[in-house]
Amino acid sequence: MESPFKPDILRGKVALLTGGGSGIGFELSTQFGKHGASVAIMGRRRNVINDAVSVLQSLGIPAVGFEGDVRKPEDARRVVEATVDKFGKLDILVNAAAGNFLVAAEDLSPNGFKTVMDIDSVGTFTMCHEALKYLKRGGPGKDPSTGGFILNISATLHYTASWYQIHVSAAKSAVDSLTRSLALEWGTDYDIRVNGIAPGPIGDTTGLSKLRPKEINSGVAQSVPLYKVGEKWDIAMAAIYLASVAGKYINGTTLIVDGGLWLSQPRHVPKEAVQQLSRTVEKRSRAEPAGIPASKL
Ligand code: COA
């Protein structure tokens, strides 16, 4: 689908995306590039990174890939510095690297829990921490009047509770908390905006295939108020909105892009029956005595 944004809306920006070589991260890399940004992607799998960079470059996007694990502080530092070495500065950091699997809480080892916390929550903080000196207003190579932007990819699982996702729910809760705290501290001190996106079920992603594997994928679309799963494009457009000048006063928000799924619950009364039922209830209510109950003495 064609973008509604002008193709130069991110012109001159340099973006580093963790998990930028696959899934939602790769769509963000592609769309940021198509809208004028230079793109660095970080991921654990060399072949995935190489393939992604080839595709980006074939689209005419200045792109570079770095192998690295957000759980390793030395990788985070090396990749942030290599991005600045390559493109001269850093304007946008996207934390899209994540880990997930379905598991009942009682079957999840503490190390399994920690693994996802380390990737999603600690990894996000580590990347933000390493990028700070480059993202802040007046950072190396940057326009002295402009601060940077951080986007944390989150989820909606923790807004209520989700089956077999205790580790990811905890990790994404922490990510949302990081988004708010950094928006406050780094917005105030360094003119860095920090926001998040909470995607719902997005087609053709590892996340969806892990959480709703085809063996149990009985009509996820039917549970979404908009009756469809989202596209990676939907997340990318939300990201461009937040990262661009269009979002210049948005700070500390996690934008839900889920078709309304997290609000969804079964309809308890058919729509056709609501009016009649409501009138009956109202009539009964008005007929009942109101106010203080009569004394039994
Ligand atoms: N069920 C239960 N526990 C699991 C598990 C599963 N499906 N997969 C991994 N674990 C546990 C392991 O048993 C291990 O714990 P233990 O040492 O107590 O046995 C711990 O998690 C770490 O597993 P390991 O395979 O060593 O981690 P890894 O670093 O190689 O991989 C994952 C990290 C597990 C998050 C892996 O799924 C991954 O790399 N994911 C990235 C892609 C992804 O999930 N994308 C979706 C984003 S929404």
Image (cartoon, rainbow, N blue to C red):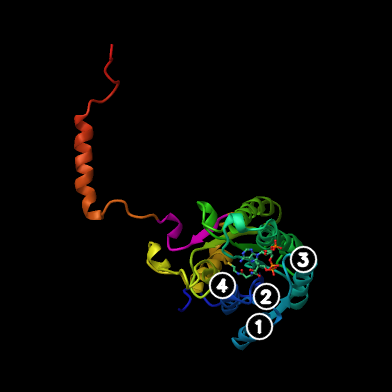
Determine if residue 293 is in view.
yes
Q: Is residue 264 above or below residue 55?
A: above
The answer to whether residue 62 is seen in the rendering is no
Residue that badge 3 annotates = 72
Quadrant of the rendered image containing residue 266:
bottom left
Q: Quadrant of ligand 1?
A: bottom right
- Report how far apart the C-alphas of labels 4 and 1 lie in the structure: 19 Å
| 221 relative to 182, above or below | below
- On whether ligand 1 comes within 8 Å of the CB at mark 4, the answer is yes
Q: Quadrant of the N terminus?
A: bottom left
The type of residue carrying mark 1 is Val
Determine whether the residue tagged by mark 2 lies in a helix, strand or loop.
strand
Closer to the chain start, of discs 4 and 2, is 2
Is 123 or 297 nearer to us in this picture? 297
Label 1 crowd (10 A; few <14 / some 14-19 / many >=20): many
Q: Which residue is mark 2?
A: 41
Q: Kindly check if marks 2 and 3 are in contact, taking CB atoms under 8 A apart as contact.
A: no
What type is the residue that disc 2 sits on? Ile
- Indicate which disc residue 206 carries: 4
Q: Is residue 173 left or right of residue 83?
A: left
Residue extent of the magenta highlight: 253-264
